[in-house]
Image (cartoon, rainbow, N blue to C red):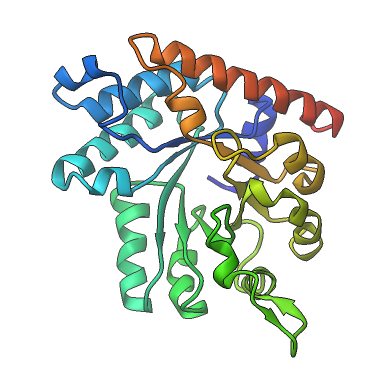
């Protein structure tokens, strides 16, 4: 999916909601465990209930890899189902890959060719040659980790270089922005650090930002939009547990739809305020 198509999708659905499919067998409703593929059965109902409100889905690959071959099959069926029900939906493989060039090339083939994802989360800390293989694919996206929501982000991402007068996450953003254009490079910036988005927008004004941390992690959608939205939106805001585990029983998909709709309505209002829809 190219950048214009993603913008159009946001305007059409009046939403910039990304739903994280962090599907854990230990948390899904018990009645689904009788299904041949409980993970896919859960995902299918979540997707069916929420696809009117979401512009993107983000399967977290660890939740599938943990089950070996059967987990990968669940993931493939999930991606195929999304493609069949709404081909315009943006699919992010949240795998956080990054290695030397030859290895990154194989990771790129696995997620862009074999799985057919539109985007892949990538770790930047081995430098440009570990990222460039992912950027060779037309209409595919790298989503580079820049400033994350977790408490451990303080360990390295806020390291300050007196020589460069930059934080490490700032260096990542500014340096990586020279490797590719806003047409195929996004950055992960956590919602729990929304106040940092004002500066981030100065450094990467046109790039999309994937913003996790709204919902269960406590990030504020309004704060994210205030500091991070540009004149074409430029945001994908992710909610995972707050949507997919909103319900515990047989009505879980209905409850997920209710939570997704509530976020979409807030997003529509924010887009209207910005004059985007």
Q: Quadrant of the C terminus?
A: top right
> Considering only vertical position in the picture, is 184 above or below 128?
above
**Residue 2 percent coordinates (x, y):** 58, 48
**Residue at (77% x, 65% y) in the render:** 203
- Residue 277 visible, this angle: no
Q: Nearer the viewer, residue 80 or 176?
A: 176
User: Among all residues in the image, which is located at the extreme bottom?
Assistant: 163
> How many numbered badges does the structure rendering display?
0
Q: Is residue 159 left or right of residue 273?
A: left
> Considering only vertical position in the picture, is 254 above or below 243?
above
Q: Is residue 1 left or right of residue 25?
A: right
Q: Nearer the viewer, residue 247 or 253?
A: 247
- Residue 188 visible, this angle: yes
**Residue 48 percent coordinates (x, y):** 41, 18
Tell me the quarter of the picture where residue 275 sits.
Answer: top right
Tell me the quarter of the picture where residue 175 sits.
Answer: bottom right
Q: Is residue 93 left or right of residue 51?
A: left
**Residue 218 percent coordinates (x, y):** 62, 38
Q: Nearer the viewer, residue 162 or 120?
A: 162
**Residue at (64% x, 25% y) in the render:** 263
Q: Is residue 274 left or right of residue 76?
A: right
**Residue at (53% x, 45% y) in the render:** 1
Tell me the quarter of the picture where residue 186 sits.
Answer: bottom right
**Residue 72 percent coordinates (x, y):** 22, 44
């Amino acid at each position: 999916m190219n950048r214009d198509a993603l913008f159009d999708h946001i305007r059409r659905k009046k939403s910039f909601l990304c739903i994280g499919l962090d599907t854990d067998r230990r948390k899904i409703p018990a009645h689904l465990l009788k299904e041949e593929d409980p993970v896919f059965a859960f995902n299918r109902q979540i997707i069916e209930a929420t696809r009117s409100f979401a512009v993107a889905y983000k399967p977290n690959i660890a939740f599938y890899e943990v089950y070996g071959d059967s987990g990968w099959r669940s993931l493939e069926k999930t991606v195929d189902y999304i493609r069949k029900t709404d081909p315009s939906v943006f699919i992010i493989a949240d795998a956080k890959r990054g290695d030397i060039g030859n290895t990154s090339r194989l990771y790129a083939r696995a997620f862009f060719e074999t799985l057919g994802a539109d985007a892949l989360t990538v770790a930047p800390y081995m430098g440009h040659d570990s990222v460039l293989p992912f950027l060779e694919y037309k209409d595919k996206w790298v989503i580079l980790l820049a400033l994350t929501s977790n408490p451990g982000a303080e360990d390295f991402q806020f390291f300050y270089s007196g020589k460069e007068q930059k934080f490490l996450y700032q260096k990542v953003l500014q340096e990586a922005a020279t490797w590719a254009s806003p047409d195929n490079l996004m950055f992960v910036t956590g919602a729990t650090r929304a106040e940092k988005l004002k500066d981030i927008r100065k450094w990467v004004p046109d790039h999309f930002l994937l913003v996790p941390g709204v919902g269960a992690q406590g990030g504020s959608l309004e704060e994210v939009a205030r500091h991070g939205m540009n004149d074409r939106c430029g945001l994908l805001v992710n909610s995972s547990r707050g949507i997919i585990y909103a319900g515990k029983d047989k009505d879980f998909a209905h409850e997920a739809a209710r939570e997704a709709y509530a976020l979409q309505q807030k997003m529509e209002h924010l887009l209207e305020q910005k004059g985007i829809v």
